[in-house]
Image (tube, grey):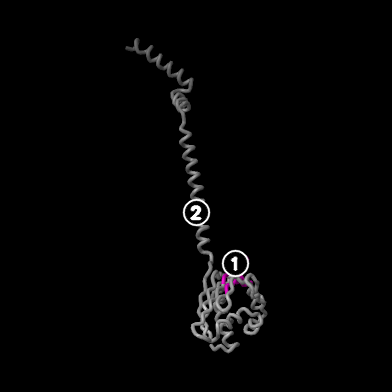
Amino acid sequence: MLAKGKPLVLEKVSDFVKAMAKGGPVKDELEAKKSAPKNTTTTSTSNSNSAAMSKEKVGVEKEAKKEVKKEGKKGFKTITMSEKINCRAKDMYEILMDENRWKGFTQSNARISKDVGGQFSIFDGSVTGINLELQEGKLISQGWRFGSWSDGIDSTVRLVFNEPEPGVTVIKLTHSDVPEEDRYGNATVVENTERGWRDLTFNKIRAVFGFGI
């Protein structure tokens, strides 16, 4: 066995030494791995999809923030009021459309056009606007704007006069698109506007012209 086995062992050892000189079995495995095709497309696609999903998520979050901000922004209100005054409807109409009478009951400067499309300025210029529709003794429709409001914001005033019986006039006021805040951030615009109609306009007219309160 020794005589026959020794040459065989020496042959195997020689083969092993030659293999180690060339890098050994590990080198063969590495070469096999290098030569094997890599699935780069899948990885690249996966990375691209991940990046796209990440960007989409960021975009959705930004849009959500914008939407919240938009919903939180102060809006507009409509003031409605009904006033009964002891006078004829045509007299009440004339008072509201006559600048000298405005000056009298408000104790402030006023310029009022009596024509549709004409402009007006009342309360020393604090309120300006334009006549949209006029029906003597029946209707006054105007575009109103306060000087303290942000640029580009206008409201609409609609005064409807009804005379259910002679000498008694019911005025229905609708003041729409009144902003909740002015350009300075004051959130009392609607409250102040409503008080201005009630106390500085209708009650003043009652007191000054003797129409009763």
Where residue 122 appears, x then y in whole percent?
64, 77
Q: Amino acid at mark 2?
A: Glu
Residue 151 highlighted magenta (yes or no): yes
- Mark 2–mark 1 distance (CA, rounded to whole Å): 31 Å
Q: Is residue 55 above or below residue 166?
A: above
Q: Is residue 6 or residue 50 the one in the foreground?
A: 50
Q: Residue at x 64, y 80 (%)?
A: 98
Q: Residue at x 38, y 15 (%)?
A: 9
Q: Amino acid at mark 1?
A: Ile
Where residue 142 appears, x then y in whole percent?
59, 72
Q: Which mark is residue 61?
A: 2
Where residue 66 appears, x then y in whole percent?
53, 57
From which residue to which does the magenta span run? 140-156
Q: Which mark is residue 93?
A: none
Q: Is residue 107 or residue 116 the one in the foreground?
A: 116
User: What is the secondary structure assignment of the residue under circle 2?
Assistant: helix
Q: Residue at x 62, y 78 (%)?
A: 97
Q: How many numbered callouts? A: 2
User: What is the secondary structure assignment of the residue under circle 1?
Assistant: loop
Q: Is residue 68 or residue 112 the one in the foreground?
A: 112
Q: Which residue is mark 1?
A: 153
Q: Which quadrant would residue 176 be assigned to in this image?
A: bottom right
Where residue 190 appears, x then y in whole percent?
54, 74
Pair 2/1: label in front:
1
